[in-house]
Every structure is written in structure tokens, then in C-alpha cells.
Image (spheres, rainbow, N blue to C red):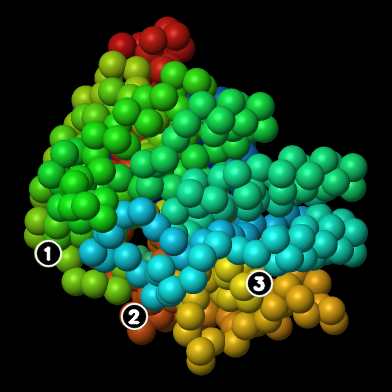
Amino acid sequence: MVKPIDERYFYAVNCAYPNSLRILNKAQFDILTAIDNQSSIATLCEKLSIQPNVLEGFLNILAETEIIKFDHSFTKPKRPNTPQSLNFWIHTTNKCNLTCGYCYISTLNTTNGMLAETQTQLLNKLVETVNRRKITSIKLRLAGGEPLGQFKFWKGFIVEAKTILKDLGCKLIVSFITNLTILNEDILTFSKANDIRFGVSLDGLEQHNDTARKFRNGLGSFKVIDENLRKLIANNIPVSVNTVVGNHNLEGLPSLTHYLIALDVPFRYSIVKGEAVDAQLLEKYLSESYAIMQDAIQTGWAFSNRHQFCDLKPNELGFQTCTSGFSGGAIYVDGTLNYCHVHFGEANQPAFSIFDEDRDLVNMIEQGSHYEDMKSTDCSLCKYKAVCTSGCPVYRVNGKDPQCTIYHKFIPLIYELQARERLKLLQDYKMIAT
Ligand code: SF4
Ligand code: SF4
């Protein structure tokens, strides 16, 4: 993809090659657009009045990240044969202190937290799998329900698991997927000492969050979340915000964008799955939000490592949308291992148990359900297929992400904003003319 940034500069990117985005000046843009898959370097030199060694040098740079190739063998995203790392969603509890109207956990408030016996077996299975498979890193996302209501129960596990796995050459990374309404000194101190990360759900500011995310007594949760978010930031504890965008909070996206940029936390906007969203309003408020991000880039805000849109991977060589079915899954409160947490409580889903003596966790993932390769023909021809990978495998419609149209509009904009960020850095460091 080759597009203008302003009247003087352009960007080029290979959407299927990681970190390939380059800024081009007008002369470089002219070279790239003169390439027609037929003309030889000599012909191009003559046409553009460039010395062959200069042209060849530039083409070699472009070829390094496959913006061009001298043959037809472009790298294709490929799934590795075996996983080196694992990633599990752990359903620590069915209990939650909020009553969000749209919560998709069908088993919410039906049982309490994970039993000690199940937690111990989880560690046994992790150790067995690491030993057998030579796994070098594991990410556990402790979720629920509200996992911070179970914090004391998980402290000992985290310390023990980190120590045991480290001795086996495996790094354990733990994060809480939380509504962040429960936070105290104990949690802050422990999190700092043990490199715990936080993924926080937030729908918007004030009423845009509080419409759906209420406490049992009917009060909204925004004020508490805001206060706790600032405490995590003040303590240098890694935190990112996840906003699921639906009809109820669309309008609040621009004000939320201002807020998250001011806090300088990484944030992700995902579009609600399995539910209709007003497409026109979605486009309008997303466009407004990206315009705010564009302004912030000019003040030095780091767009590319602060914002993510849905599960899109503009800078990675994506071969699938998430780790489910390859190197990850979701472990329910009773030790059942599902393809994804959205399947918890569904009796018709094939599932294994961590109490199964005959299989390690990788066997269970391999032998479980597989939705990841069910993709449409459109997707196989799409220029953004490595960025989008057809979206969430569970919620595809006819093999496509229901937000395909929105992606086609916003993926080029995301690259353009990355290009603007890069151009500003190059200009600030005087590596390119202003
Ligand atoms: S869902 Fe749409 S954007 Fe995504 S890969 Fe398929 S065709 Fe491309
Ligand atoms: S299957 Fe879908 S909902 Fe589940 S983890 Fe993957 S992307 Fe997320």
C-alpha cells in the first residue's frame, strides 16, 4: 500500500510483513510507483534519470521488508508447528460485584471461586506441559467474574508458580482482567513486587460507563475505576484499558479518547461481538476519535504503542486472531479447558479437564475444537488478511469478521497515523526536512 501523508511525504507498507512501514519523499515515491513488474532497473534508471547504483541501493532497502521483491516469493504468514509459549484465560470465579447488563459469562454468579485443589492441579499441569514441551513463556490472564475479589487466594499461587516455572526455564507473566473497582495497598504492593499487569474494562466516561457498568446498589462504577486507574499509573504498574464499543457507549468514544490520551495508557477499542451496532454512528464516532489521536500525535503521543483497534495486527505477521486452538485456551473455575471463555457453560462444546491424566495442556488444545481456519474466500483474497486474520473465529459470519467493512475503512487510517507519528519523529530528530 502506497499513500500520501501530506503534499511532500508518502508512506509505503507491506500489510503482510511486520514493521515494514516506510516514509518516502517525492523522489522515492516516484521510484516506487514507476515499478510496474516489467521494467528492468536499467529502464527505470533511464526513465527516472537516476544512477543505477543509487536506484539499486534504494530498491535493496525496500526489498529488506518486502515492500518490493525481485522475485515472486513474498513471505506468507505461517503457523509454527509447535508453540513455544502458552496463553490461558483463567476463570478464577463466577462471582462479580458489578451487574453489567451485557455480560456474556453465562455462568455468572452460579458458583464461587476456583477450589484450592483445582488451583494446585493447574500448577501441576503447567509444570508437566513445560517439562514435556520445552515451553519458554506462559501468560495467564486471571479473569472471571471479578478476579480481584479473589486476590488473596491467587497471591500464593502466583509466587509459587513463578518460582517453579523459572527454575524450568519458563517465564510466567500474570495479568488481572478486571473491572478495577477493588484495589488496596496489598494489591498494589504485591503487583509491583511481582510484575503483575492489569487489563481494565471501561465503557467511557461518567454516564457512558455507568449506564451498563453498575454496582449491585445501582451506583455507577466510573469514579472508582478512575481513581484506581490513577493509582496503578502512579505506582508504575502496567495497565491497559479495554473498551467494548456498542450502541450504548458509541457517542462517548471521543471524550474517552481524550481521557485515555491524557492518562497516556495503552487502550484498545473493540467492537461488541454477536450484537448489531449502528454502522453509521460507529464510523462517525470512530472517525472523531481517530482525529483526536491524529492531533495528539503532533504533540508527541505514541499512537502505535498506545492504541489497538479490535484484534487487528498492523505490525505483526499474523497467522491467526488469538492464541485459541494453537497455543491457548480458557480454563474454567472447575478445571475444564475450553477453546475460548465465551464457551464456558456450553454443554455442547468439546472440552477437556486439567484433571485428565492422559493429556498435557498442549494435547488438550490440539485435540479440542478448532474454528481458526474457517475463513471465507473473500478473506483469502483480501490485502488485509494478515492484519485481520478474518477476526474472532467464534463470531465470524460466513467465514468473515462482521466488521469487515469498518476494517477496510480504518486499516489504511491506522497505517496513516503510524506514518504521521514516524514522520514527526524523523522531523523532530532532523532526519528528514520539515
Ligand atoms: S474479514 Fe474482511 S478485512 Fe478481514 S480478512 Fe476477511 S475480507 Fe479482509
Ligand atoms: S476466540 Fe474470539 S473471543 Fe475467544 S479469545 Fe479468540 S478472539 Fe477472543
- Residue at the location (60% across, 37% down)? 196
Q: What amino acid does circle 2 point to?
A: Val
Residue type of the residue flagged with mark 1: Asp
Q: CA distance from mark 1 to mark 2?
A: 17 Å
Mark 3 C-beta closer than 8 Å to ligand 2:
no
Residue closest to the eye, 167 or 379: 167
Residue 201: horizontal and vertical position, in percent? 36, 47
Check disc 2 and report the residue beneath it.
397
In the picture of the structure, the residue carrying the numbered disc 1 is 278
- Which comes before the other along the chain, label 3 or label 2? 3
Q: Position of residue 109 (x, y in %)?
A: 41, 68
In the shown orientation, is residue 293 left or right of residue 149? left
Q: Position of residue 227 (x, y in %)?
A: 32, 28
Quadrant of residue 65 in the image? Answer: top right
Q: Amino acid at mark 3?
A: Gly
Taking 227 as reference, is 377 above or below it?
below
The residue at 72%/48% (across/down) is 157
